[in-house]
Image: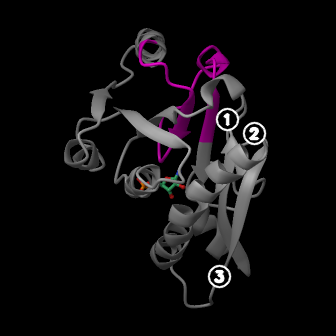
Amino acid sequence: MKKFLGSNKLKTAVFISGTGSNLKSLIKFSLKKKSPIKINFIISSSSKANGLKYAIKFKIKRKIFDYKNKQKDEDLILKQLKKKDIGLICLAGYMKILSNNFIKFNGIILNIHPSLLPNYKGLNTHERVIQNKEKFSGCTVHFVSSKLDSGKIVLQKKVRVNKTDTPKKLSKKILKQEHILYPQAIMKLFANL
Ligand code: GRF
């Protein structure tokens, strides 16, 4: 990790599949002077991902891999990351599961998940949280490991679930916190080096 530090910012790739609101917040964060990262590359699993508009707006190189041939695409992605000297991958709503081979990537891979891990791994977290009448939910930034949503936790934020919350309302509330948490988690990682 240390080899990426110094006066240069850590070259970062963000992987998306959809709206890209976390991507947007990470780009904004990366442009701040205090930020230790620079976003050099965006990978999307879909050409229709709305988040690609931020790649265009902020003139960041982007590539789409649809995973029709997962191994081939992962190999191509790894090659691109190496060529661009990427040291950090931020998964932000990326709907593909990375293979064990991919996560041997020579750098850090982080993910953001909309629950208080280790609770509610996987999909449809807000629906399940509301169904179980939880008083709190939240979001978690964690290292990516070979098991889904199970890597070491970097940072979490708790969010209260109101009785009137629908999955949509809760998702909106948590997403707002995600946009604060992801940059904070990256700052924390660097502070601990
Ligand atoms: C977020 O809730 C994130 O935690 C989850 O997928 C959603 C992505 O949202 N992994 P966005 O594309 O960043 O707006």
Q: Which colour scheme is used?
A: one colour
> Upstream in the sequence, badge 2 or badge 3?
2
Q: Are marks 1 and 2 in contact (CB under 8 Å)?
A: yes
- Tag 3's secondary structure? loop
Q: Nearer the viewer, mark 2 or mark 3?
A: 2
Residue at left 46%, top 55%?
29
Residue at left 35%, top 48%?
18
Q: Quadrant of residue 159?
A: bottom right
Q: Nearer the viewer, mark 1 or mark 3?
A: 1
> Upstream in the sequence, badge 1 or badge 3?
1
Residue at left 79%, top 45%?
192
Q: Are marks 1 and 3 in contact (CB under 8 Å)?
A: no
| 50 relative position to 104: left or right | left
Q: In which quarter of the image is residue 133?
A: bottom right
> Upstream in the sequence, badge 1 or badge 2?
1
Marking on residue 144:
1
Residue 1 seen in the current view: no
What main secondary structure does the magenta stretch of the protein show? loop
Q: Where is residue 64 in the image (x, y as percent from the top left)?
A: 30, 28
Q: Where is residue 99 in the image (x, y as percent from the top left)?
A: 60, 20
Is-magenta flag for residue 94? yes
- Amino acid type at circle 1 is Val
Q: Distance between the residues labelled 2 and 3?
A: 25 Å
**Residue linked to disc 2:** 151
- Tag 2's secondary structure? loop
- Tag 1's secondary structure? loop
Q: Distance between the residues labelled 1 and 3?
A: 27 Å
**Residue linked to disc 3:** 161
Range shown magenta: 83-110
